[in-house]
Amino acid sequence: MRPATLVRLALAGNRTDTARVVLTALSALLATLAGLTALTVLAIEKPAGDAWAQSEQYRNALLREPGLRGGTAFALLMLAVPVLALAGQCARLGAPARDRRLAALRLAGATPGQVTRLAVLETGLASLLGTGAGLGVYLVGRDLLHRPDDQGRLALPTDVLPPVGALAAVVLGLPVIAALATALMLRTVTTSPLGVSRKAARERGPRPWAGLLIGLGLGSFIAVRPLLYRVEGNAVLLGWLVPLLFLLSGLTAMIGVVVGAGWISYTCGRLLRKHARGASALLAAGRLMADPWAGSRTFAALLAALIFGAGAAAQRAYFVAQDALDREQDRLAGVEDGGANPFYLSTMDLVDAAVAVAVLIAAGGLIVALVEGIVARRRAYAALVATGVPRATLSGSVAWQALTPAVPAILLALTVGVLLGRGLFPSVTTSGSSALVCDATAALCDDPATRDQYTHLVQTAATERTVAVPLEHLAWLGAGALAAVLVTVGVGLLFLRVSTAVDELRTA
Protein backbone atom coordinates (compact mmCIF):
# COMPACT_ATOMS: atom_id res chain seq x y z
CA MET A 1 0.00 0.00 0.00
CA ARG A 2 1.48 3.33 -1.09
CA PRO A 3 2.09 6.07 1.52
CA ALA A 4 -0.36 8.41 -0.23
CA THR A 5 -3.06 5.73 0.00
CA LEU A 6 -2.30 5.20 3.69
CA VAL A 7 -2.66 8.92 4.38
CA ARG A 8 -5.93 9.14 2.43
CA LEU A 9 -7.40 6.15 4.26
CA ALA A 10 -6.21 7.47 7.63
CA LEU A 11 -8.13 10.72 7.13
CA ALA A 12 -11.22 9.02 5.73
CA GLY A 13 -14.32 8.20 7.75
CA ASN A 14 -17.65 9.54 8.95
CA ARG A 15 -18.46 12.49 11.21
CA THR A 16 -17.39 10.57 14.31
CA ASP A 17 -13.97 9.92 12.79
CA THR A 18 -13.68 13.59 11.89
CA ALA A 19 -14.60 14.56 15.46
CA ARG A 20 -11.97 12.15 16.80
CA VAL A 21 -9.27 13.67 14.58
CA VAL A 22 -10.27 17.22 15.53
CA LEU A 23 -10.35 16.49 19.27
CA THR A 24 -7.04 14.63 19.12
CA ALA A 25 -5.48 17.56 17.25
CA LEU A 26 -6.92 20.01 19.80
CA SER A 27 -5.43 17.98 22.66
CA ALA A 28 -2.06 17.92 20.91
CA LEU A 29 -2.30 21.70 20.43
CA LEU A 30 -2.88 22.28 24.16
CA ALA A 31 -0.07 19.89 25.12
CA THR A 32 2.26 21.67 22.68
CA LEU A 33 1.47 25.05 24.21
CA ALA A 34 2.19 23.72 27.70
CA GLY A 35 5.49 22.19 26.60
CA LEU A 36 6.65 25.23 24.64
CA THR A 37 5.74 27.56 27.48
CA ALA A 38 7.78 25.46 29.91
CA LEU A 39 10.74 25.45 27.51
CA THR A 40 10.48 29.22 27.19
CA VAL A 41 10.74 29.64 30.95
CA LEU A 42 13.79 27.38 31.02
CA ALA A 43 15.35 29.29 28.11
CA ILE A 44 15.65 32.51 30.14
CA GLU A 45 19.36 33.16 30.55
CA LYS A 46 20.81 33.75 33.98
CA PRO A 47 22.01 37.35 34.24
CA ALA A 48 25.65 38.10 34.82
CA GLY A 49 26.75 38.59 38.38
CA ASP A 50 26.59 36.59 41.59
CA ALA A 51 24.24 33.72 42.38
CA TRP A 52 21.53 36.13 43.58
CA ALA A 53 21.39 38.16 40.37
CA GLN A 54 17.88 38.41 38.94
CA SER A 55 16.43 39.05 35.50
CA GLU A 56 15.01 42.48 36.12
CA GLN A 57 13.31 42.70 32.73
CA TYR A 58 10.33 40.71 34.09
CA ARG A 59 7.58 41.90 36.42
CA ASN A 60 6.84 38.48 37.93
CA ALA A 61 9.24 37.13 40.55
CA LEU A 62 8.68 33.59 39.22
CA LEU A 63 10.51 34.69 36.08
CA ARG A 64 13.01 37.08 37.69
CA GLU A 65 14.53 34.63 40.18
CA PRO A 66 16.53 31.82 38.50
CA GLY A 67 15.87 29.40 41.36
CA LEU A 68 12.11 29.54 40.83
CA ARG A 69 12.04 28.88 37.10
CA GLY A 70 12.48 25.12 37.40
CA GLY A 71 9.39 24.80 39.59
CA THR A 72 7.44 27.09 37.27
CA ALA A 73 8.37 24.98 34.24
CA PHE A 74 7.44 21.80 36.12
CA ALA A 75 4.01 23.22 37.00
CA LEU A 76 3.46 24.10 33.34
CA LEU A 77 4.43 20.59 32.28
CA MET A 78 1.98 19.16 34.80
CA LEU A 79 -0.78 20.93 32.88
CA ALA A 80 0.04 18.64 29.97
CA VAL A 81 -0.93 15.55 32.01
CA PRO A 82 -4.73 16.08 31.85
CA VAL A 83 -4.35 17.21 28.24
CA LEU A 84 -2.61 13.96 27.28
CA ALA A 85 -5.27 12.00 29.16
CA LEU A 86 -7.90 13.89 27.16
CA ALA A 87 -6.07 12.89 23.98
CA GLY A 88 -6.23 9.27 25.07
CA GLN A 89 -9.98 9.53 25.63
CA CYS A 90 -10.48 11.22 22.26
CA ALA A 91 -8.57 8.43 20.51
CA ARG A 92 -11.25 5.97 21.69
CA LEU A 93 -14.13 8.01 20.29
CA GLY A 94 -16.10 6.03 17.72
CA ALA A 95 -13.99 2.91 18.27
CA PRO A 96 -16.69 0.39 17.16
CA ALA A 97 -17.22 2.16 13.82
CA ARG A 98 -13.47 2.36 13.30
CA ASP A 99 -13.15 -1.35 14.06
CA ARG A 100 -15.76 -2.15 11.43
CA ARG A 101 -13.93 0.07 8.92
CA LEU A 102 -10.64 -1.70 9.62
CA ALA A 103 -12.34 -5.08 9.25
CA ALA A 104 -13.74 -3.97 5.89
CA LEU A 105 -10.21 -3.07 4.78
CA ARG A 106 -9.06 -6.55 5.77
CA LEU A 107 -11.92 -7.99 3.75
CA ALA A 108 -10.75 -5.89 0.79
CA GLY A 109 -7.29 -7.47 0.99
CA ALA A 110 -5.28 -5.35 3.42
CA THR A 111 -2.80 -7.20 5.61
CA PRO A 112 -2.89 -7.03 9.44
CA GLY A 113 0.30 -4.94 9.40
CA GLN A 114 -1.19 -2.46 6.96
CA VAL A 115 -4.30 -2.10 9.09
CA THR A 116 -2.19 -1.51 12.19
CA ARG A 117 -0.06 1.08 10.40
CA LEU A 118 -3.25 2.78 9.24
CA ALA A 119 -4.56 3.14 12.80
CA VAL A 120 -1.18 4.36 14.02
CA LEU A 121 -0.90 6.84 11.14
CA GLU A 122 -4.34 8.26 11.88
CA THR A 123 -3.35 9.16 15.44
CA GLY A 124 0.07 10.41 14.39
CA LEU A 125 -1.30 12.67 11.66
CA ALA A 126 -3.98 14.12 13.93
CA SER A 127 -1.36 14.83 16.59
CA LEU A 128 1.00 16.36 14.01
CA LEU A 129 -1.77 18.70 12.84
CA GLY A 130 -2.32 19.73 16.45
CA THR A 131 1.35 20.28 17.27
CA GLY A 132 1.86 22.28 14.08
CA ALA A 133 -1.12 24.47 14.94
CA GLY A 134 0.18 24.77 18.51
CA LEU A 135 3.54 26.00 17.25
CA GLY A 136 1.78 28.59 15.12
CA VAL A 137 -0.37 29.77 18.05
CA TYR A 138 2.75 29.97 20.23
CA LEU A 139 4.69 32.09 17.73
CA VAL A 140 1.76 34.41 17.02
CA GLY A 141 0.92 34.76 20.72
CA ARG A 142 4.55 35.50 21.48
CA ASP A 143 4.41 38.57 19.22
CA LEU A 144 0.96 39.70 20.39
CA LEU A 145 1.81 39.43 24.10
CA HIS A 146 5.14 41.25 23.85
CA ARG A 147 3.99 44.43 25.61
CA PRO A 148 6.65 46.07 27.85
CA ASP A 149 5.37 48.48 30.50
CA ASP A 150 6.59 52.02 31.15
CA GLN A 151 9.73 50.65 32.82
CA GLY A 152 10.44 48.24 29.98
CA ARG A 153 9.52 45.15 32.01
CA LEU A 154 7.57 42.22 30.58
CA ALA A 155 4.74 40.20 32.07
CA LEU A 156 5.76 37.08 30.11
CA PRO A 157 9.12 35.88 28.72
CA THR A 158 8.32 36.93 25.17
CA ASP A 159 11.89 38.15 24.65
CA VAL A 160 13.37 34.65 24.60
CA LEU A 161 12.85 31.67 22.32
CA PRO A 162 13.74 28.04 23.05
CA PRO A 163 16.39 26.41 20.85
CA VAL A 164 15.20 25.17 17.47
CA GLY A 165 16.03 21.61 18.48
CA ALA A 166 13.79 21.85 21.54
CA LEU A 167 10.94 23.26 19.44
CA ALA A 168 11.32 20.43 16.94
CA ALA A 169 11.45 17.86 19.72
CA VAL A 170 8.08 19.01 21.05
CA VAL A 171 6.37 19.47 17.68
CA LEU A 172 7.60 16.16 16.25
CA GLY A 173 8.04 14.22 19.48
CA LEU A 174 4.41 14.37 20.64
CA PRO A 175 3.04 12.79 17.42
CA VAL A 176 5.70 10.09 17.61
CA ILE A 177 4.77 9.35 21.23
CA ALA A 178 1.08 9.26 20.30
CA ALA A 179 1.77 6.88 17.43
CA LEU A 180 3.89 4.59 19.64
CA ALA A 181 1.20 4.60 22.33
CA THR A 182 -1.39 3.59 19.72
CA ALA A 183 0.84 0.77 18.50
CA LEU A 184 1.30 -0.38 22.09
CA MET A 185 -2.46 -0.42 22.72
CA LEU A 186 -3.02 -2.39 19.50
CA ARG A 187 -0.54 -5.12 20.42
CA THR A 188 -3.36 -7.37 21.74
CA VAL A 189 -5.82 -6.47 18.97
CA THR A 190 -6.49 -8.82 16.07
CA THR A 191 -8.17 -7.36 12.99
CA SER A 192 -9.75 -9.95 10.74
CA PRO A 193 -12.32 -9.71 7.91
CA LEU A 194 -14.93 -10.77 10.45
CA GLY A 195 -14.21 -7.96 12.88
CA VAL A 196 -11.85 -6.79 15.60
CA SER A 197 -11.13 -8.90 18.67
CA ARG A 198 -9.06 -8.23 21.75
CA LYS A 199 -7.11 -10.96 23.50
CA ALA A 200 -6.58 -11.81 27.15
CA ALA A 201 -9.99 -10.94 28.53
CA ARG A 202 -9.86 -10.45 32.30
CA GLU A 203 -11.68 -13.17 34.23
CA ARG A 204 -11.08 -11.83 37.74
CA GLY A 205 -11.12 -8.39 39.21
CA PRO A 206 -8.00 -6.28 39.76
CA ARG A 207 -6.08 -6.66 42.98
CA PRO A 208 -5.21 -3.76 45.32
CA TRP A 209 -1.53 -3.76 44.34
CA ALA A 210 -1.83 -0.06 43.51
CA GLY A 211 -1.62 0.60 47.25
CA LEU A 212 2.04 -0.42 47.11
CA LEU A 213 2.72 2.24 44.47
CA ILE A 214 0.97 4.85 46.57
CA GLY A 215 2.97 3.86 49.66
CA LEU A 216 6.23 3.84 47.72
CA GLY A 217 5.52 7.28 46.26
CA LEU A 218 4.58 8.76 49.63
CA GLY A 219 7.61 7.21 51.35
CA SER A 220 9.99 8.51 48.69
CA PHE A 221 8.47 11.97 48.89
CA ILE A 222 8.81 12.07 52.68
CA ALA A 223 12.46 10.99 52.32
CA VAL A 224 13.26 14.10 50.29
CA ARG A 225 13.47 16.38 53.35
CA PRO A 226 16.08 14.31 55.26
CA LEU A 227 17.99 13.94 52.00
CA LEU A 228 18.16 17.73 51.64
CA TYR A 229 20.08 17.99 54.91
CA ARG A 230 22.47 15.21 53.91
CA VAL A 231 23.37 16.67 50.51
CA GLU A 232 23.37 20.29 51.65
CA GLY A 233 26.28 22.05 50.01
CA ASN A 234 26.54 19.52 47.18
CA ALA A 235 25.33 21.53 44.18
CA VAL A 236 25.44 18.54 41.82
CA LEU A 237 23.15 16.36 43.92
CA LEU A 238 20.85 19.26 44.72
CA GLY A 239 20.68 20.08 41.03
CA TRP A 240 19.51 16.70 39.74
CA LEU A 241 18.99 14.10 42.49
CA VAL A 242 16.43 16.00 44.56
CA PRO A 243 14.30 17.17 41.59
CA LEU A 244 14.44 13.66 40.11
CA LEU A 245 13.28 12.16 43.39
CA PHE A 246 10.49 14.73 43.56
CA LEU A 247 9.33 13.81 40.07
CA LEU A 248 9.57 10.04 40.41
CA SER A 249 7.90 9.84 43.82
CA GLY A 250 5.06 12.15 42.78
CA LEU A 251 4.47 10.25 39.54
CA THR A 252 4.58 6.91 41.38
CA ALA A 253 1.91 8.01 43.83
CA MET A 254 -0.16 9.47 40.97
CA ILE A 255 0.06 6.26 38.94
CA GLY A 256 -0.93 4.30 42.03
CA VAL A 257 -4.07 6.41 42.48
CA VAL A 258 -5.02 6.15 38.80
CA VAL A 259 -4.45 2.39 38.70
CA GLY A 260 -6.23 2.04 42.03
CA ALA A 261 -9.34 3.52 40.44
CA GLY A 262 -9.72 0.18 38.63
CA TRP A 263 -9.79 -1.71 41.92
CA ILE A 264 -12.19 0.87 43.36
CA SER A 265 -14.54 0.42 40.38
CA TYR A 266 -14.51 -3.37 40.71
CA THR A 267 -15.04 -3.25 44.47
CA CYS A 268 -17.91 -0.78 44.10
CA GLY A 269 -19.46 -3.07 41.51
CA ARG A 270 -19.25 -6.05 43.88
CA LEU A 271 -20.80 -4.07 46.72
CA LEU A 272 -23.60 -2.82 44.48
CA ARG A 273 -24.34 -6.31 43.20
CA LYS A 274 -24.44 -7.64 46.74
CA HIS A 275 -26.49 -4.93 48.44
CA ALA A 276 -28.38 -3.00 45.73
CA ARG A 277 -32.02 -3.77 45.01
CA GLY A 278 -32.89 -1.47 42.11
CA ALA A 279 -32.46 -2.41 38.47
CA SER A 280 -30.36 0.70 37.75
CA ALA A 281 -27.81 -0.11 40.44
CA LEU A 282 -27.62 -3.76 39.38
CA LEU A 283 -27.00 -2.80 35.74
CA ALA A 284 -24.27 -0.40 36.86
CA ALA A 285 -22.74 -3.12 39.05
CA GLY A 286 -22.50 -5.44 36.06
CA ARG A 287 -20.80 -2.79 33.94
CA LEU A 288 -18.34 -1.84 36.70
CA MET A 289 -17.31 -5.45 37.19
CA ALA A 290 -17.15 -6.23 33.47
CA ASP A 291 -14.78 -3.35 32.71
CA PRO A 292 -13.26 -2.06 35.97
CA TRP A 293 -10.34 -0.38 34.19
CA ALA A 294 -12.78 2.02 32.55
CA GLY A 295 -12.61 3.97 35.82
CA SER A 296 -8.84 4.34 35.51
CA ARG A 297 -9.13 5.52 31.93
CA THR A 298 -12.05 7.84 32.61
CA PHE A 299 -10.86 9.52 35.82
CA ALA A 300 -7.10 9.56 35.13
CA ALA A 301 -6.86 13.25 34.24
CA LEU A 302 -9.25 14.35 36.99
CA LEU A 303 -7.43 12.37 39.68
CA ALA A 304 -4.05 13.72 38.54
CA ALA A 305 -5.38 17.28 38.75
CA LEU A 306 -6.83 16.64 42.21
CA ILE A 307 -3.55 15.23 43.54
CA PHE A 308 -1.71 18.29 42.28
CA GLY A 309 -4.41 20.61 43.66
CA ALA A 310 -4.44 18.95 47.09
CA GLY A 311 -0.66 19.14 47.28
CA ALA A 312 -0.86 22.83 46.39
CA ALA A 313 -3.48 23.32 49.13
CA ALA A 314 -1.13 21.73 51.67
CA GLN A 315 1.66 24.01 50.45
CA ARG A 316 -0.58 27.06 50.81
CA ALA A 317 -1.44 25.99 54.37
CA TYR A 318 2.29 25.83 55.12
CA PHE A 319 2.87 29.39 53.85
CA VAL A 320 -0.14 30.69 55.83
CA ALA A 321 1.04 28.97 59.02
CA GLN A 322 4.61 30.25 58.57
CA ASP A 323 3.38 33.79 58.01
CA ALA A 324 1.15 33.65 61.10
CA LEU A 325 4.01 32.34 63.25
CA ASP A 326 6.39 35.03 61.97
CA ARG A 327 3.84 37.73 62.78
CA GLU A 328 3.39 36.33 66.28
CA GLN A 329 7.13 36.23 66.88
CA ASP A 330 7.42 39.84 65.68
CA ARG A 331 4.72 40.95 68.11
CA LEU A 332 6.43 39.17 71.01
CA ALA A 333 9.68 40.85 70.10
CA GLY A 334 7.97 44.22 69.96
CA VAL A 335 8.72 44.59 66.26
CA GLU A 336 6.15 46.55 64.31
CA ASP A 337 4.19 44.30 61.97
CA GLY A 338 5.25 45.18 58.46
CA GLY A 339 2.70 42.96 56.75
CA ALA A 340 3.02 39.62 55.04
CA ASN A 341 5.11 39.00 51.96
CA PRO A 342 2.48 38.42 49.26
CA PHE A 343 4.84 36.59 46.91
CA TYR A 344 4.22 33.02 48.03
CA LEU A 345 0.46 33.34 48.43
CA SER A 346 0.11 35.13 45.09
CA THR A 347 2.15 32.34 43.53
CA MET A 348 -0.22 29.79 45.04
CA ASP A 349 -3.10 31.75 43.48
CA LEU A 350 -1.50 31.08 40.09
CA VAL A 351 -1.13 27.40 40.97
CA ASP A 352 -4.81 27.23 41.97
CA ALA A 353 -5.75 28.80 38.63
CA ALA A 354 -3.67 26.15 36.86
CA VAL A 355 -5.45 23.42 38.85
CA ALA A 356 -8.83 24.90 37.88
CA VAL A 357 -7.81 24.80 34.21
CA ALA A 358 -6.65 21.19 34.63
CA VAL A 359 -9.98 20.20 36.20
CA LEU A 360 -11.86 21.83 33.30
CA ILE A 361 -9.72 19.91 30.80
CA ALA A 362 -10.29 16.72 32.78
CA ALA A 363 -14.04 17.39 32.73
CA GLY A 364 -13.82 17.51 28.94
CA GLY A 365 -12.12 14.13 29.01
CA LEU A 366 -14.86 12.76 31.27
CA ILE A 367 -17.53 13.93 28.85
CA VAL A 368 -15.73 12.36 25.88
CA ALA A 369 -15.25 9.07 27.75
CA LEU A 370 -18.86 8.82 28.95
CA VAL A 371 -20.34 9.76 25.57
CA GLU A 372 -18.00 7.32 23.83
CA GLY A 373 -19.16 4.52 26.14
CA ILE A 374 -22.83 5.31 25.53
CA VAL A 375 -22.41 5.55 21.76
CA ALA A 376 -20.37 2.32 21.68
CA ARG A 377 -23.15 0.43 23.50
CA ARG A 378 -26.08 2.14 21.83
CA ARG A 379 -27.24 -1.07 20.18
CA ALA A 380 -27.37 -2.86 23.54
CA TYR A 381 -29.21 0.09 25.10
CA ALA A 382 -31.68 0.16 22.21
CA ALA A 383 -32.28 -3.58 22.62
CA LEU A 384 -33.02 -3.09 26.32
CA VAL A 385 -35.51 -0.31 25.53
CA ALA A 386 -37.14 -2.50 22.87
CA THR A 387 -37.65 -5.28 25.44
CA GLY A 388 -39.41 -2.91 27.82
CA VAL A 389 -36.67 -1.48 30.04
CA PRO A 390 -37.58 2.16 30.89
CA ARG A 391 -35.16 4.82 29.79
CA ALA A 392 -35.18 6.14 33.36
CA THR A 393 -33.65 2.84 34.49
CA LEU A 394 -30.85 3.15 31.93
CA SER A 395 -30.28 6.78 32.93
CA GLY A 396 -30.01 5.71 36.55
CA SER A 397 -27.51 3.00 35.67
CA VAL A 398 -25.32 5.54 33.85
CA ALA A 399 -25.41 7.82 36.89
CA TRP A 400 -24.61 4.94 39.27
CA GLN A 401 -21.76 3.79 37.05
CA ALA A 402 -20.17 7.25 36.97
CA LEU A 403 -20.73 8.43 40.55
CA THR A 404 -20.14 5.23 42.54
CA PRO A 405 -16.40 4.90 41.79
CA ALA A 406 -15.91 8.67 41.44
CA VAL A 407 -16.60 9.57 45.09
CA PRO A 408 -14.05 7.21 46.72
CA ALA A 409 -11.52 7.87 43.95
CA ILE A 410 -11.80 11.64 44.53
CA LEU A 411 -11.34 11.16 48.28
CA LEU A 412 -8.29 8.96 47.67
CA ALA A 413 -6.71 11.51 45.31
CA LEU A 414 -7.25 14.37 47.76
CA THR A 415 -5.79 12.32 50.61
CA VAL A 416 -2.69 11.34 48.66
CA GLY A 417 -2.16 14.92 47.48
CA VAL A 418 -2.36 16.29 51.02
CA LEU A 419 0.01 13.60 52.33
CA LEU A 420 2.50 14.48 49.61
CA GLY A 421 2.38 18.15 50.57
CA ARG A 422 2.54 17.53 54.31
CA GLY A 423 5.29 14.95 53.91
CA LEU A 424 7.58 17.68 52.63
CA PHE A 425 6.52 20.44 55.05
CA PRO A 426 4.77 18.91 58.09
CA SER A 427 5.44 21.84 60.41
CA VAL A 428 6.61 25.45 60.58
CA THR A 429 9.51 26.58 62.73
CA THR A 430 11.22 29.75 63.85
CA SER A 431 14.63 29.98 65.45
CA GLY A 432 15.17 31.81 68.71
CA SER A 433 16.08 35.48 68.43
CA SER A 434 16.73 38.55 70.51
CA ALA A 435 16.03 42.22 69.83
CA LEU A 436 16.40 45.57 71.59
CA VAL A 437 12.98 47.20 72.04
CA CYS A 438 12.37 50.84 73.00
CA ASP A 439 9.05 51.41 74.84
CA ALA A 440 9.06 55.22 74.70
CA THR A 441 8.02 57.71 72.09
CA ALA A 442 9.90 58.08 68.85
CA ALA A 443 11.59 61.27 70.04
CA LEU A 444 12.92 59.64 73.23
CA CYS A 445 14.01 56.54 71.39
CA ASP A 446 15.86 58.58 68.77
CA ASP A 447 17.71 60.65 71.39
CA PRO A 448 20.96 58.88 72.39
CA ALA A 449 20.78 60.48 75.83
CA THR A 450 17.42 58.93 76.74
CA ARG A 451 17.33 55.87 74.53
CA ASP A 452 19.07 53.52 76.96
CA GLN A 453 16.58 54.32 79.75
CA TYR A 454 13.66 52.88 77.79
CA THR A 455 15.41 50.10 75.90
CA HIS A 456 15.39 46.47 77.02
CA LEU A 457 16.31 43.14 75.48
CA VAL A 458 13.48 40.84 74.36
CA GLN A 459 14.26 37.20 73.59
CA THR A 460 11.96 34.78 71.78
CA ALA A 461 12.37 31.03 72.01
CA ALA A 462 12.47 28.67 69.04
CA THR A 463 8.95 27.53 68.11
CA GLU A 464 7.59 24.66 66.03
CA ARG A 465 3.95 24.15 65.08
CA THR A 466 2.14 21.56 63.00
CA VAL A 467 0.57 22.80 59.79
CA ALA A 468 -3.21 22.55 59.81
CA VAL A 469 -5.01 20.38 57.27
CA PRO A 470 -6.64 22.69 54.67
CA LEU A 471 -10.09 21.12 54.99
CA GLU A 472 -11.95 24.05 53.44
CA HIS A 473 -9.70 24.12 50.38
CA LEU A 474 -9.97 20.35 50.00
CA ALA A 475 -13.76 20.55 50.29
CA TRP A 476 -13.87 23.06 47.45
CA LEU A 477 -11.63 20.85 45.32
CA GLY A 478 -13.75 17.79 45.99
CA ALA A 479 -16.98 19.70 45.33
CA GLY A 480 -15.60 21.02 42.05
CA ALA A 481 -14.54 17.55 40.93
CA LEU A 482 -17.91 16.07 41.90
CA ALA A 483 -19.67 18.89 40.06
CA ALA A 484 -17.62 18.06 36.96
CA VAL A 485 -18.73 14.43 37.21
CA LEU A 486 -22.38 15.49 37.62
CA VAL A 487 -22.17 17.76 34.57
CA THR A 488 -20.63 14.86 32.66
CA VAL A 489 -23.50 12.59 33.67
CA GLY A 490 -26.00 15.23 32.55
CA VAL A 491 -24.39 15.54 29.12
CA GLY A 492 -24.20 11.75 28.85
CA LEU A 493 -27.91 11.40 29.57
CA LEU A 494 -28.68 13.70 26.64
CA PHE A 495 -26.76 11.35 24.33
CA LEU A 496 -28.39 8.34 25.99
CA ARG A 497 -31.84 9.46 24.90
CA VAL A 498 -30.72 9.68 21.27
CA SER A 499 -28.80 6.40 21.44
CA THR A 500 -31.73 4.39 22.81
CA ALA A 501 -33.95 4.94 19.78
CA VAL A 502 -35.22 1.63 18.45
CA ASP A 503 -33.92 2.63 15.01
CA GLU A 504 -30.41 1.99 16.34
CA LEU A 505 -31.15 -1.77 16.08
CA ARG A 506 -31.18 -1.36 12.30
CA THR A 507 -28.46 1.26 11.82
CA ALA A 508 -25.91 0.30 14.51
Image (cartoon, rainbow, N blue to C red):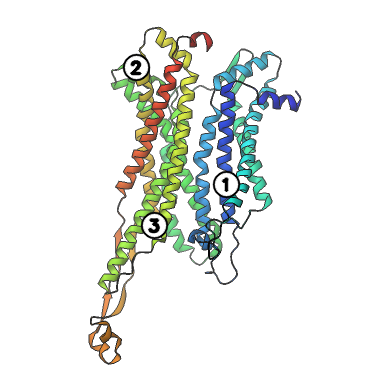
Amino acid marked by disc 1: Gly
Residue 293 seen in the current view: no
Residue lying farthest right?
A: 2
Q: In the displayed structure, does residue 126 sit left or right of residue 388?
A: right
Question: Percent x, y for residue 227?
Answer: 46, 59
Q: Earlier in the sequence, mark 3 or mark 2?
A: 3
Amino acid marked by disc 3: Leu
- Reply above or below: 59 against 33: below
Crowdedness near tag 1: few (<14), some (14–19) or many (≥20) residues, C-alpha within 10 Å: many
Determine the residue positioned at 74% across, 28% down.
Answer: 3
- Measure how far apart labels 1 and 3 are at the Cα level: 25 Å
Look at the numbered disc 3 and give the secondary structure of its residue. helix
Image marks 1 and 2: residues in contact by CB distance under 8 Å: no
Question: Percent x, y for residue 82?
Answer: 49, 39
Mark 1 = which residue? 35
Mark 2 = which residue? 392
Image marks 3 and 2: residues in contact by CB distance under 8 Å: no
Residue lying farthest front?
A: 150
For this rendering, which residue is in front, 124 or 23?
Answer: 23
The quarter of the picture where the N terminus appears is top right
Residue 380 seen in the current view: yes
Q: Which of marks 1 and 2 is nearer the N terminus?
A: 1
- Tell me the number on the disc at residue 203: none
For this rendering, which residue is in front, 232 or 310?
Answer: 310
Q: Which of marks 1 and 3 is nearer the N terminus?
A: 1
Mark 3 = which residue? 345
- Reply above or below: 9 against 322: above
